[in-house]
Amino acid sequence: MSGLSDAQRTDVTAAVEQLAWTVVREKLELNRDAGPHSDVPEADLRRMWLAALTSLLAIRDSAEQLAASAALSAAQRGADYPAIGAAAGMTRQGARRKWPGLVGLSDERQRKLTWWNRRGDQFAQCVRAVLATSVEGPRLAALRERLDDIEQAGPAQRIDALDLALVDAHAVAVGVPAPVEPIAEHASGLLAALTADADAAMNSHSSLVTRACGRGDCPAEPVVELWRSDYRFDGHRPVPACRAHAVEALAQPATRIVAAYQPDVALSVLAEAHGEG
Ligand SMILES: [Zn+2]
């Protein structure tokens, strides 16, 4: 295999051998220093070497699974088949045969993973803040489960879990009644904005409708949509707002950013509204 020196390969072999014998001792319930020493009876040696064979092949299977998972993780971070093949000591075609379908995740799934890798920690932190400060309800319980799902999922399943989490996060963040406690209110507002940014970053749908800032005849370009859970303005629909009017409106209680027209704009508008911008 490419990429490792002879000395490194010797180290790997020694570590695997050590692991195999640890497994053998566990399997045969031997004590810690037991091994294929010369004073061991033939029948016991035979049992040990058969157990060593079993455990070495189990290690090989585990390594294969871990290698497939590593190839997927590398691909999700931009590695192509030539790079994966080079790392695996095989040709590009060989890597593609061995692990088909790694590259060419749809653009949308790629965007979702990219967003999660960049913002996932903040999202999880924000969900936990909402969970800690809000009154428990079915939606919050669902969101808590989704968060666990995402954190326990492998990369391939993470995207699906994330989709569901964002739906729940959106429902929680725009839910009525809005929390009264300032800390809870802040957490919900942040979760709404993060969710709006996530949607903008992950989905390529461009708004076909020409929108205008909801504030009268404001000529500025709208960047987000706002929703007030206690006040049905413009019927029952979120209202587009330009940056300045969004910042102004967010000073009102229970006002949420529920959509963003560009990635990352919601968080920055919210930060400006809170005087952090
Ligand atoms: Zn405006």
Image (tube, rainbow, N blue to C red):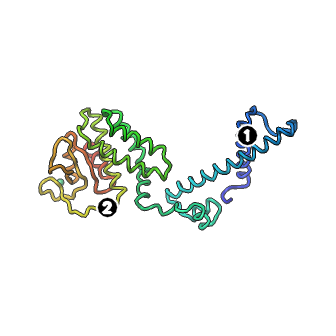
State the residue in front, 212 or 59.
Answer: 59
* Count of picture labels: 2
What SS does tag 1 mark? helix
Given the current orientation, which residue lies at the most extreme left position?
Answer: 216
Image check: 211 left or right of 188?
A: left
Rendered image: mark on residue 24: 1
Cα distance in 3D space between marks 2 and 1: 56 Å
- On screen, residue 56 versus residue 173, left or right, reads right
Rendered position, 87 above or below 141? below
Q: Is residue 171 left or right of residue 120?
A: left
> At x 26% / y 48%, what residue is drawn?
257
Residue at x-position 18% and y-position 41%: 230
Mark 2 residue element: loop
* Residue nearest the observer in this picture, 267 or 28: 28
Q: Which mark is residue 9?
A: none
Task: Please give the name of the residue rendered at 47% of the width and 61% of the height, measured from the top-left corner.
Answer: 105
The answer as to whether callout 2 falls within 8 Å of ligand 1 is: no
**Badge 1 local density, few (<14 within 10 Å), some, or many (20+)?**
many
Q: In the rendering, at what x and y percent does residue 247 appear?
A: 22, 47
Quarter of the rendering containing residue 212: bottom left
Q: Residue at x 67, y 47 (%)?
A: 59
Query: Where residue 220 sits: x, y (%)?
Result: 19, 58
Ligand 1's image quarter is: bottom left
**Which is nearer the N-term, disc 2 or disc 1?**
1
Q: Quadrant of residue 147?
A: top left
List x then y, in percent, for residue 155.
Answer: 49, 51
Query: Which residue type carries mark 1?
Result: Val
Horizontal and vertical percent position of residue 22: 71, 39
Tag 2: amino acid: His
Residue indicated by mark 2: 205
